[in-house]
Image (cartoon, helix red, strand yellow):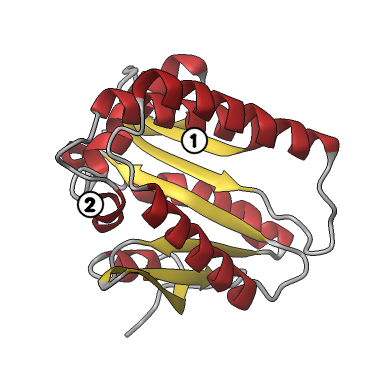
Amino acid sequence: MAVRVSLLTEADIPGAVTAIQQAFADDPYNNWVFDKSTFDPRRNAASLAIRCRWGMRNGIFHVAKAEGSDEVLGVACWLRPRAADAPPTWRDWFEDWRLWLSQVGMNLYYGRGGLNVKRYYIWKEAQARAQSAVWTDAAGYYFLNIMVVRPAAQHRGVGRLMMEEVTRRADAEGRRCYLESSRDVPNMRIYGRFGFRFAKELECDDDGTAIRLFAMVREPGAGPETK
């Protein structure tokens, strides 16, 4: 199966949302941050579509498709490196408010859809602490915000094609890459094939109900982990 990787377009968003929902249906983070008894897949789809549009404007958002088909097989969204001392721009400010207003409108229409807001902010705080500790390169990191492949399309090299679209660029620029995985097994082994190494564990604990996430960093030109 020949697969092509291209930038996400508006027409791709429904397929991208479906791919993300399928891939994260039993994800540890999703299971922790959402109440499954009140989970609303329509609200989740609307939230993901908002995030897709934000990613199109502000990140590097790829989709993978089989040649001759419009079905989205995989999705990858990267945030571009940002120098540690770079002040926010007016565009950053505008995009933050645009995202916030879109989310407010979504919540007014759908409600929270099972989202545990307390746990969401526990995660955001843990993420901020981890990034503060791990992001030591003043030049910034390519941040792999999301990488999914539909279950039916896995083990066909789809993830590798999407990953290498940006790791090649990072190598050419001499930049590090960063990601956070919601599973240690098998995800850390898979990411290790692309040169990522474990950097820090994030613990998100809500009064004893906790999950762990795993921060990983890739050095420029890093090869597969051998152990």
At a point 19% along the width and 42% down the height, the residue shown is 151
Q: Any mark on residue 62, and which?
A: 1
Q: Are marks 2 and 1 in contact (CB under 8 Å)?
A: no
Q: Which residue is mark 2?
A: 31
Picture layout, residue 177 above or below residue 219: above
In the picture, measured across the screen, residue 141 lies left or right of residue 223, that is right
The secondary element bearing badge 1 is classed as strand
State left or right for residue 113 relative to residue 91. Answer: left
Q: Position of residue 11 (x, y in %)?
A: 45, 14
What is the spatial separation of the Cα atoms under label 2 and label 1, in whole angstroms?
Answer: 26 Å
Q: Pick the residue in front: 43 or 116.
A: 116
Crowding around mark 1 (Cα neighbors within 10 Å: few <14, some 14 to 19, many 20+) is: many
Figure quadrant of residue 32:
bottom left
Front position among marks 2 and 1: 2
* Relative vertical location of residue 159 with respect to residue 6 in this rendering, above or below: below
Q: Position of residue 13 (x, y in %)?
A: 42, 22
Where, by quadrant of the figure, is residue 86 drawn?
bottom right
Q: Position of residue 222 (x, y in %)?
A: 53, 72
Indicate the position of residue 94 as horizontal and vertical percent values.
Answer: 75, 31
Q: Assign a secondary structure to mark 2.
A: helix
